[in-house]
Image: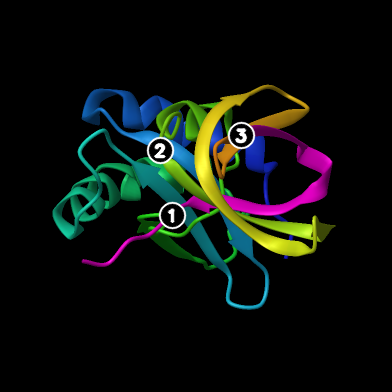
Amino acid sequence: MKIKPLDEIRAFFEDAAKEFGIEIVDVEFNDKTAALTAYIETESGVDLDTCEKFHNAVMDPIDVLDPTFGAPYTLNISSPGLDRPFKTARDFERNLNKEVELKLFAPMKGKKFLSGVLTAFDDNSVTVALGGENVKIGRNKIAKINKAIKFE
């Protein structure tokens, strides 16, 4: 199915999100299900009411944008989930000095899965406190990095 560029669709969502104090984390289109999904985040987290309010606010205006050139689609507004991978600089900023989990493409010191505190990042690498030492890891070596989830 042909759709408008995701950057254009994302810009639409970002404009609409400003008045709600919502950050657009990601926008995806699934060709198989014809589903357009915007993943949102707020400083206090995302609940069902937040998703519903934002969905209702963008439902009619996005039809004017016509992201699928008249083809039917399903609009989803969702939380990105607790274990979502970091994708943006804002994701890394939000998780500085917090515990993160990393999955590496290849083992480092015999391990492909690491857990530590994110102490720094830039476009090319992240620094994680592991066992009392700061370890700098190239972002190209990381398959996935996300917030560590602790159940108490």
Using a 10 Å C-alpha cutoff, classify the residue at mark 1 as few (fewer than 14 neighbours), some (14 to 19) or many (20 or more). Answer: some
Circle nearer the N terminus (2, 3): 2
**Colouring scheme applied when the structure was drawn:** rainbow
Mark 1 and mark 2 residues within 8 Å of each other at the beta carbon: yes
The residue shown at (64%, 31%) is 127
Q: Check residue 98 in the rendering and tell me which mark sits there, or answer none.
A: 2
Q: Amino acid at mark 2?
A: Lys
- Reading the image, the residue beneath label 3 is 133
Of badges 1 and 3, nearer the viewer stands 3
In this view, which residue lies farthest toward the left? 49
Determine the secondary structure under disc 1. loop
Please report contact status of discs 1 and 3: CB closer than 8 Å, yes or no. no
Gap between marks 2 and 3 measured at Cα: 15 Å
Say if the magenta span includes residue 44. no
Left or right of 60: which side holds 96? right
The kind of residue on which mark 1 rests is Ala
Vertical arrangement, residue 25 with respect to residue 19, above or below? below
Q: Please tell me which of labels 1 and 3 falls first in the chain.
A: 3
Marks 1 and 2, the one that precedes in the sequence: 2
**For the point 26% across and 45% down, which residue is it?**
54
Which residue is denoted by mark 1 in the rendering? 148
Which span of residues is magenta-colored?
134-152
Q: Residue at x 58, y 70 (%)?
A: 34
The amino acid marked with disc number 3 is Glu
* Position of 65 relative to 59 (above/below): above
x then y, percent, for residue 94: 41, 30
